[in-house]
Amino acid sequence: MAPGGGVCKDVIESHPKTLKYETAAGTKNDKTIIRTATGKHGMQSTNGVHELLECPVCTTLMYPPIHQCPNGHTLCSNCKTRVHNCCPTCRLEMGNIRCLALEKVAESLELPCRHQTLGCHDIFPYYSKLKHEQNCRFRPYNCPYAGSECSVTGDIPYLVAHLKDDHNVDMHDGCTFNHRYVKSNPHEVENATWMLTVFNCYGRQFCLHFEAFQLGMAPVYISFLRFMGEDSEAKKFSYSLEVGGYGRKFTWQGVPRSIRDGHRKVRDSQDGLVIPRNLALFFSGGDRQELKLRVSGRIWKE
């Protein structure tokens, strides 16, 4: 036992790896050479070095501060809290020892983006990789079907098929639309479930949302459009929405938001056609006991 190291009994199970280091007789094929995007000759990163940087608990790459126990076993800062300061490998108390040598080694590495298989082929210094991956344009999108808080992620073709097959979302071709929304009891705003329709327009996909929600103490309806792609591409399009009746019209024109912005974020920012309930009931006509709104609109490319 290392001097001063206490023994811990209950820890989260770890997955230690046995590292194999190459001898002088090893061939070049035994190593994976990491190339840099700037033309620099990056450090040759063996599989062993890469494994050294993996946390034995969560198996993700470690970033400073990298902790080590008195026996030299390393752990990321998040998992150090999870295992209650006990080494998951030898069960000694971790203490507050930093593995400065491994942090220094990490500075020499340049690695590909984790979204490489999705199309990102850039190479990044080890400590810049994580920041890039959080905003990489090739990272998976979240499912835009907010009604069930769906946790599915994927690229756009996958999500389009998922919306159609798993959520039974209506799919339409064309850049103009005319939809009718009916609710038998519009006073029950919390039960006025939202709706989603997907349009194929200019070879891209757009999500039309319509729902009821509380704006302060006042119940309102909102309709807005989201673009299935990046924000930079969404800004190349515009759209208009219109609702009306009895010789009156209520219109909205804007730019579709990317599905990178969550449904709730767009709704709460009121970035769309917002219709107060009294006005919605006026457009519905009749005895004002049933919601009958016809929302029309079009999408065009700037």
Image (cartoon, grey):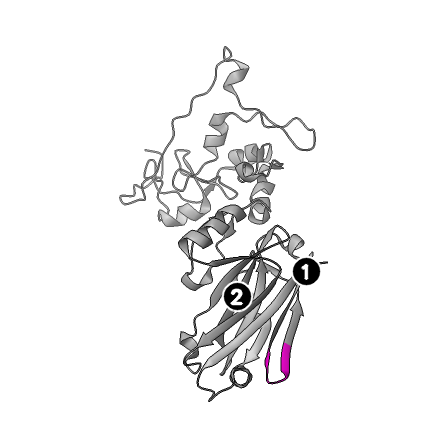
Tell me the element at label 2. strand
**Dominant secondary structure (helix, strand or loop) of the stretch shown in magenta:** strand
Residue 91, percent from left and from top: 32, 39
> Does the image show residue 270?
no
Mark 1: which secondary structure? strand
Earlier sequence position, callout 2 versus callout 1: 2
Q: State the image coordinates of residue 19 (x, y, percent, origin top left).
A: 42, 25
Q: Which residue is mark 2?
A: 209
Residue shown at the point (58%, 60%) measured from the top left: 226
Does the magenta run of residues contain 83? Answer: no
Q: Is 92 or 155 nearer to us in this picture?
A: 155
2 or 1: mark nearer the eye:
1
**Observer-nearest of 160 and 292:** 292
* Magenta-drawn stretch contains 248: yes
Q: Is residue 85 above or below residue 186?
A: above
- Mark 1, residues whose alpha carbon is within 10 Å: few (<14), some, or many (≥20)? some
Q: Where is 281 relative to 181, above or below? A: below
Return the residue at label 1: 300
Q: Locate residue 243, reporting x and y percent.
A: 59, 76
Q: Quadrant of residue 172?
A: bottom right
Residue 143 falls left or right of residue 2: right
Image quadrant holding the C terminus, namely: bottom right
Specify the label residue 170 is tagged with.
none
Q: Which residues are magenta?
A: 244-250
| Residue found at x 55% / y 27% | 45
Q: Is residue 100 above or below residue 21?
A: below
Separation of residues labelled 2 and 1 (CA atoms): 18 Å
Amino acid at the residue labelled 2 = His
